[in-house]
Image: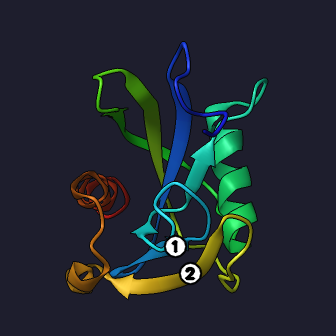
Amino acid sequence: MSDREYQARPIVGIGIVVLRGDEVLICRRGKPPNVGSWTLPGGAQDIGETCKDAARRELQEETGLLVADLHFCDYVDTVRRDGDGRVRFHYTILDFCAAYAGGEAVAGSDVSEVRWVPIDELGPYALWTEAHRIIGIARGILNP
């Protein structure tokens, strides 16, 4: 059992949509949960860290990229219960977006691969439905 299971309160997670033209940056998870699955960059917020600082840190740690202006997109609650109905995991994820500003994306901590993918070609990567929804919101914010 990990230290994130069966918590008394939800864990705040941070997600970041980085757009480069019609492409979005995605990462393949290198650690549990969901090892090997594709997702948006992000991770847990640390105590004493603002949401935007957490977004910048996670993006830099996982991809090596830095971005300028961050914009709030939306939040997602994910609750997973065990066989007895007890809450095993509860994450409240705050999603931000930013336009690509430069640099080379490379896989860092917690991810095994990073990739720029045309948004209309995301099908084979089996992203979570909520990730698609957040990407759509990010497109509206960054490309009004």
Q: Amino acid at mark 2?
A: Val
**Would you name the residue on which mark 1 appears?**
27
Q: Nearer the viewer, residue 19 or 128?
A: 128
**Residue 144 seen:** no
Disc number placed over residue 114 in the picture, else none: 2
**Residue 55 seen:** yes
Q: In this image, 13 relative to 90: left or right?
A: right
Q: Residue at x 69, y 86 (%)?
A: 104
Q: Quadrant of the C terminus?
A: bottom left
Q: Quadrant of the N terminus?
A: top right
Q: Is residue 92 above or below residue 55?
A: above
Q: Amino acid at mark 1?
A: Cys
Q: Residue at x 70, y 82 (%)?
A: 103
Give percent across and percent down for residue 24: 41, 75
- In the rendered structure, which disc, 2 or 1, sits on the residue that comes first in sequence? 1
Give percent across and percent down for residue 56: 68, 52
**Quadrant position of residue 136:** bottom left
Q: Is residue 111 above or below residue 49?
A: below
The residue lying furthest to the top in this view is: 8
Q: Are marks 2 and 1 in contact (CB under 8 Å)?
A: yes
Q: Is residue 136 above or below residue 80?
A: below
Query: What is the image's colouring?
Result: rainbow
